[in-house]
Image: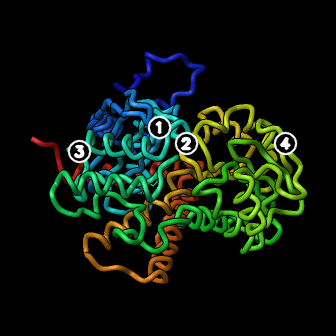
């Protein structure tokens, strides 16, 4: 069961309580009645599964996984699956609620869901990873499907993992089912443009924020925490538009490059070294001092809860765009607000990934592939419209961007919930 308010100590960061209180607050701003707010906050369905995996040495280890459907009033559940040693039910519940809001903010016909397995995938061989994925997919199979709940990649999961899930569910149902997951390889119903879509959405939001503040992207110094699926492609996207990536961090450490990181050189270096550390000309910085690197725009693109009180008070950037899910704690957010640092929140900034998933799913359902240009054009349009609608509302309401995005999302979920009524 997810943690309730009275069960936690105030000083521990609990992502579920944070998201639940943000949704409640948006409900109060919208003057929704309490029963409706509780319906929107509370996850619809929580499944916890045990995943026995035969190791290569013949022994069996048992892992725990979850799939949570948070809200289905606007459509089937949608959201990624993460494999990480820190995964727990509160984190997955928080992320599933974020997905409900995110899908509503970008106005795609989905509810929110999320899944995860508590495992450090670096400790698994490829065969063990496949067995874990297939057994997890089997365990959550009754809950997922193209018109029910559609998983996608998230932290430490990729197109290969999606292929195994798609195959496992297809085998169980007796027919090929490409629409059951998104973020698949092209050869089995994936889509042009899915890889890098989150980063493109982050770029559109960064440009949108700069424009609204009357600033040119030229020469803006950016620090990106994370060099994975989202942080990786961002370097090229931002530098192509005149910005300068002066700081980068990965799990091995952090670097400062005042002249700016070149995307191609970094990818060559990373290809050989498997870490960003050692990039030519870079000065290494302590990971906990990363956001103090002199910069204009901070982009957390790794794990949740990193921008806490301390990071928020010492951050040098004057703007932040959340590429990660839930990177900012409640205290962190209050300090950034006090310091007048605008933050484009995760549910808007990183929504390019799920919009791309929606396009992939639509193509699978239709059995008709779109060309790459059409995909990119539509992705840009969805993200621009979402940014603009949150910005207009932000000006009308005078709220922080995060609270505004929550209001926009919760309002749409509430409308769908009211229209559908209460069963039975
Ligand atoms: N994991 C991504 C997210 O957090 C994508 C989810 C999806 O495409 O369903 O938004």
- For this view, does 176 lie left or right of residue 322? left
Labels 2 and 4: the sequence-earlier one: 4
Task: Give the image quadrant in which the ligand numbered 1 is located.
Answer: bottom left
User: Relative to 106, does residue 274 appear above or below in the rendering?
Assistant: above
Residue 172: horizontal and vertical position, in percent? 19, 51
Q: Secondary structure at mark 3?
A: helix
Q: Do residues under tags 1 and 2 come within 8 Å of each other at their CB atoms? A: yes
> Which quadrant of the figure has residue 11?
top right
Q: Which mark identifies residue 326?
A: 2
Residue 162: horizontal and vertical position, in percent? 39, 55
Q: Identify residue for label 4.
A: 285
Residue, x 49% and y 75% (percent of image)?
A: 381
Q: Identify residue for label 3.
A: 143
User: Relative to 228, does residue 268 appear above or below in the rendering?
Assistant: below
- How far apart are the two marked residues, 4 and 1, measured between alpha carbons? 32 Å
Q: Do residues under tags 1 and 3 come within 8 Å of each other at their CB atoms? A: no
- How far apart are the two marked residues, 2 and 4, measured between alpha carbons? 24 Å
């Amino acid at each position: 069961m997810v943690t309730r308010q009275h069960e936690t100590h105030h000083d521990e960061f609990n992502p579920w309580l944070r998201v639940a209180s943000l949704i409640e607050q948006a409900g109060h701003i919208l003057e929704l009645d309490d029963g409706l707010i509780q319906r929107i906050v509370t996850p619809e369905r929580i499944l916890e599964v045990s995943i026995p995996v035969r190791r290569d040495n013949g022994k069996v280890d048992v892992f725990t996984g979850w799939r949570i459907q948070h809200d289905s009033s606007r459509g089937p559940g949608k959201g990624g699956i993460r494999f990480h040693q820190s995964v727990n039910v509160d984190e997955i519940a928080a992320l599933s609620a974020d997905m409900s809001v995110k899908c509503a903010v970008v106005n795609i016909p989905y509810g929110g869901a999320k899944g995860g397995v508590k495992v450090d995938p670096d400790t698994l061989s490829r065969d063990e990873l496949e067995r874990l994925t297939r057994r997890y997919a089997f365990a959550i199979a009754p809950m997922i499907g193209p018109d029910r709940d559609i998983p996608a990649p998230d932290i430490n999961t990729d197109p290969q993992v999606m292929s195994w899930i798609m195959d496992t569910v297809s085998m169980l149902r007796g027919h090929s089912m490409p629409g059951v997951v998104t973020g698949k390889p092209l050869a089995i119903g994936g889509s042009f443009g899915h890889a890098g879509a989150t980063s493109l959405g982050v770029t559109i939001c960064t440009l949108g924020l700069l424009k609204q503040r009357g600033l040119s992207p030229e020469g803006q110094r950016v620090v990106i925490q994370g060099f994975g699926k989202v942080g990786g492609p961002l370097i090229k996207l931002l530098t192509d538009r005149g910005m300068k990536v002066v700081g980068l961090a990965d799990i091995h450490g952090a670097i400062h490059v005042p002249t700016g990181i070149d995307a191609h050189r970094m990818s060559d270096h990373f290809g050989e070294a498997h870490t960003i550390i050692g990039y030519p000309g870079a000065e290494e910085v302590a990971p906990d001092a990363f956001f103090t690197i002199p910069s204009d725009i901070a982009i957390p693109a790794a794990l949740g809860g990193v921008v806490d009180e301390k990071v928020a008070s010492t951050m040098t950037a004057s703007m932040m765009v959340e590429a990660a899910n839930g990177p900012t704690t409640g205290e962190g957010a209050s300090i950034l607000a006090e310091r007048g640092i605008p933050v484009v929140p995760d549910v808007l900034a990183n929504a390019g990934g799920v919009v791309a998933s929606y396009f992939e799913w639509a193509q699978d359902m239709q059995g008709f592939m779109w060309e790459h240009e059409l995909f990119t054009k539509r992705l840009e349009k969805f993200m621009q419209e979402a940014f603009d609608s949150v910005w207009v509302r932000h000006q009308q309401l005078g709220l922080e961007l995060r609270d505004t995005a929550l209001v926009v999302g919760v309002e749409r979920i509430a409308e769908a919930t009211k229209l559908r009524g209460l069963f039975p």
